[in-house]
Image (spheres, rainbow, N blue to C red):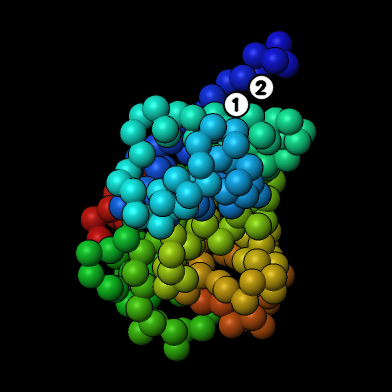
Amino acid sequence: MFDEVRREVIREIAVKIAGDIIFSKNPGKAMKKWRERFEISQGQLARRMNISPSMISDYESGRRKSPGVNVLRRFVASLISIDIERGMPILTRLYRLSMDSSLLDKAILDSREFAEPISIGEFCNRIGAELITCQESSKIVLLGYTLVDSIRLVIEVPAYLYIRLFRGTTQRAAIFTNITYGRSSIIAVKVFQAGTGLRPALVVLHGLKKVDRVGRIVAERERIPLAIVPTVPLNELLERLRAI
């Protein structure tokens, strides 16, 4: 059973590597990225592929055109076989990252970028939220939002993956649903900020009439703009968000 699982994991990673190279605007650069990620020299890879190191160099530098199917297959197989002989350190790491990422994907209920920027004040009006801290931040611009299941995020997702919630910019609203008091969501934002220096431009708690006292104090002290949306069905909140 273990061997079957291992084969399936290796197959998935092989497909990911090949796809990344095929769809890259610069296949040679992508090949170099994966070779270096597996910590394999051009010489080691060339010997395993039974080609000259200069051929590897030519692909990576762009002097040769994109590799054909046969070269790409041998390239991926060589990376994997060398790593297996080393005890699978990189394959294991890639598998764990993919598993962690799938947990984050399950925690994210919705995420999008706005066609045009919108102020925090207007955003709160559109979704029926009340800004309860940092009211002076109402004119700050938002570029998008991410809606997450707070229980799954806090319990199941490693903290180092929280940065992916930002989708490339911190100028967005982090909306937490499935909450009881709101304290854990605020503290999670504080912990992330302490570790990275980053935080969302707005935190929204869905389903609360009144935020937990400790959570509010933390938000005020950390200067985190915090808004709450009263108890409305999740599907109604989603409709309001997608109408923006």
Which residue is at a point 66% across and 83% down the rendered structure image? 221
Q: Is residue 35 above or below residue 244?
A: above
Report the residue marked by disc 2. Answer: 6
Q: Which mark is residue 19?
A: none
Q: Quadrant of the C terminus?
A: bottom left
- Label 1 crowding class (10 Å Cα cut-off): few <14, some 14-19, many 20+? some
Q: Is residue 52 above or below residue 182?
A: above
The residues tagged by marks 1 and 2 sit, at their Cα atoms, a distance apart of 5 Å
User: Which quadrant of the structure image shows residue 89?
Assistant: top right
In the picture as drawn, the residue positioned furthest to the right comes out as 87
Which residue is at a point 64% across and 72% down the rendered structure image? 196
Q: Position of residue 55 (x, y in %)?
A: 45, 45
- The answer to whether the residue labelled 1 contacts the one labelled 2, judged by CB atoms less than 8 Å apart, is yes
- Label 2 crowding class (10 Å Cα cut-off): few <14, some 14-19, many 20+? some
Q: Is residue 132 above or below residue 45?
A: below
Determine whether the residue tagged by mark 2 lies in a helix, strand or loop.
helix
Left or right relative to 159: residue 21: left
Q: Position of residue 164 (x, y in %)?
A: 52, 57
Q: Amino acid at mark 1?
A: Val
Which residue is at a point 68% across and 36% down the rendered structure image? 83
Report the residue marked by disc 1. Answer: 9
Nearer-the-camera pick, 95 or 74: 74
Determine whether the residue tagged by mark 1 lies in a helix, strand or loop.
helix
User: Which quadrant of the structure image shows residue 71?
Assistant: top left
Q: Amino acid at mark 2?
A: Arg
